[in-house]
Image (tube, rainbow, N blue to C red):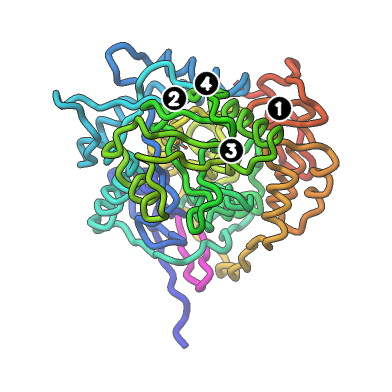
Amino acid sequence: MSAPEQIDVDIVVVGAGAAGLSAALTATAEGARVAVVTATALAQTASYWAQGGLAAALAIDDTPLLHLEDTERAGRELVRRSAAEVLVSEAPEMILGLQRRGVVFDADRHGNFALGLEGGHSRRRIVHAGGSATGRRLVRQLSAELVSQPSVIVREQRRAASLWQEEGRVLGVVCDDGLAVRARATIIAAGGAAALWSRTTNPPGSLGGGMLLAWGAGAAVADLEFVQFHPTAVTGVPGREGFLITEAIRGEGAVLLDPAGERFVEELAPRDEVATAIWNVLERTGAQAVQLDMRAVDPARFPNVVEALRSSGLDPARETIPVAPAAHYVMGGVVTDLHGDTGVPGLYAVGESACTGLHGANRLASNSLTECVVFGARAARAALGEPAIAPTGPPPAPEPAQDPQRTTQDAMWRHAGLVRDAEGLALLAADPHPLARLVARCALAREESRGSHVRRDFPQTDPGLAMHHAVVRGDEPHLEVWR
Ligand code: SIN
C-alpha cells in the first residue's frame, strides 16, 4: 500500500464555497502556493445553491452608511460595528472586482446593475447573476479561475478530518483519506451548520464540521444561539421539502397569505420578523403552511425557482405555494477578528464558519455572500504573514466524522427551533453531538428574546444585553461586549 500523500504549500483552505474561493484566489494572486480541500466536488458547495445575491451600496440613491444602518437595524443591537463597516465599505469595489474576473451580473437595458430588493433593505442593493442562480454563477466562475492557476492544488471530495497542531500552532490539515497538507496558515471556510436542524434549506453536508475542527484546536465559538430561519421554504411537497424560495421574489411583489387568504405581515420586514409572524399563524391556526402568492411576479425573472416548482407539479404562475420557515443560516461560529484570525496561531476562519459579529442577532439578507468574498480576501492577506514553521513530528491521524444522528437533528428543530425554552434547551445540552450541546449552552445563556433567538420563558428583549455576545472559550459561555 502506498503512503498517504503529503503536500507542502503556503496556505491551505478548507472549503471551496464563495469564502474559500475568495481566500484561495487572493492568496494565489499574492504569489502563494495554495491547496484547497473540499468535501464536495468543486462548484457544488452550499454557496452553489445560494439563490440570494450580494448586497452592496451601488445604486445612485444608496451609500455604505445606509447599508450599515440597515445591517445594524436587522441585527437587533448586536452587530459589531467595526465588522459591518468593513463589509459595507469594501462591498462595492468587491462587486466590480468580481465583474472584472468575468462574473456576469444581471443588468437593466442600459447596462446598469439590475438591483434587487430584499427584506430589511431600505434601498435596492442586491446584485444577482442569472436571477436566482447567483451562487451557482459565482462559484462556477471562481472555481474555473482557481483550477487554471498553476500554483493551486485542489483535492475534492475529501473531508478535513484533523488539524495538524504542534505546541498550539496549526501547521496544516489532515484529510479522512490520510492526505496531509502542511501550510503556514490554515483557513477554515467550510460553511455553516443549518443542516443540523431537521428542517433546513441547506444541503445535507452543512453540519458545522469546520467549526468543530477549530473548536477542537482551541478556538472560541460565539453567537450559536442565533440561527436564521428562512421564512419561505417549501413544505408538504414530496421531493421539495425545505426548497428555498428566494426573498427576492417577495422583493418583486410576492405576498404571504394565512389560511384565510389574508396578508398578515409586511413581507419585506427583516427575516426574523417574517419567520416569527409565520410561526405565530401556524401556531394559532394549526396549519402546516402559509401560502406564498407569486402569481403577479414575472416567472422569467426567477427561472430556476419556477422550473424547480414546476418539476414538482406546482405552477407558481397559477397557484400559491405552501411555505414555512426552515433553518437557513447560523449567525454564530468561530470567533475571529476582522482578518479572519481565530487567535489560535496559524488558524483562520471565514464565511459562515466564522463569527465576526457582523450579523448580530439576525443577518440582513444577502450580506453573507458579500461577507464571504470580502472577508475571504482579508483572511488570505493576513494569513500570508504567518511564519513557516516545520513540524517536528508526523501528522496526526484523521479523526472520525462527527455526523449527527437523526434524533439530534429532530431535537435541534424541537428544542432550538423558532421558539425555545430552558426545559428543551437543557435536554439539548445533553445531546451526544458536540455542536448541538454548544448551541444549547449559548441559547441557555441568553435569557432574553432578540432577533432570531426567541425564548418562550424570556419573551422580552433585555436592553442590558445589547452588544453582548455569548462566547464559549472553555466550557461555559460568558457574555462579552464587542465593538
Ligand atoms: C434568499 O434569497 O432569500 C436567501 C439569500 C440569503 O440567505 O441571503
SS of the residue under disc 4: loop
- Marks 3 and 4: which is nearer the front? 4
The residue beneath circle 3 is 229
Q: Residue at x 47, y 30 (%)?
A: 365
The reply to whether callout 2 and callout 1 are in contact (CB within 8 Å) is: no
Q: Residue at x 20, y 24 (%)?
A: 112
The reply to whether callout 4 and callout 2 are in contact (CB within 8 Å) is: no
**Distance from Cα at disc 1 to Cα at disc 3:** 25 Å
Please report whichever mark, 4 or 2, sits nearer to the chain's N-terminal start.
2
Asked whether, in this view, residue 62 is left or right of residue 180, the answer is left
Badge 3 density bin: few <14, some 14–19, many ≥20, Cα 10 Å: many
The reply to whether callout 1 and callout 4 are in contact (CB within 8 Å) is: no
Badge 1 density bin: few <14, some 14–19, many ≥20, Cα 10 Å: some
The number of callouts visible is 4
Asked whether, in this view, residue 227 is left or right of residue 370, the answer is right
Q: Residue furthest left?
A: 110
SS of the residue under disc 3: strand
Q: Position of residue 243 (x, y in %)?
A: 48, 48
The residue beneath circle 1 is 480
> Magenta span covers which residues?
173-183
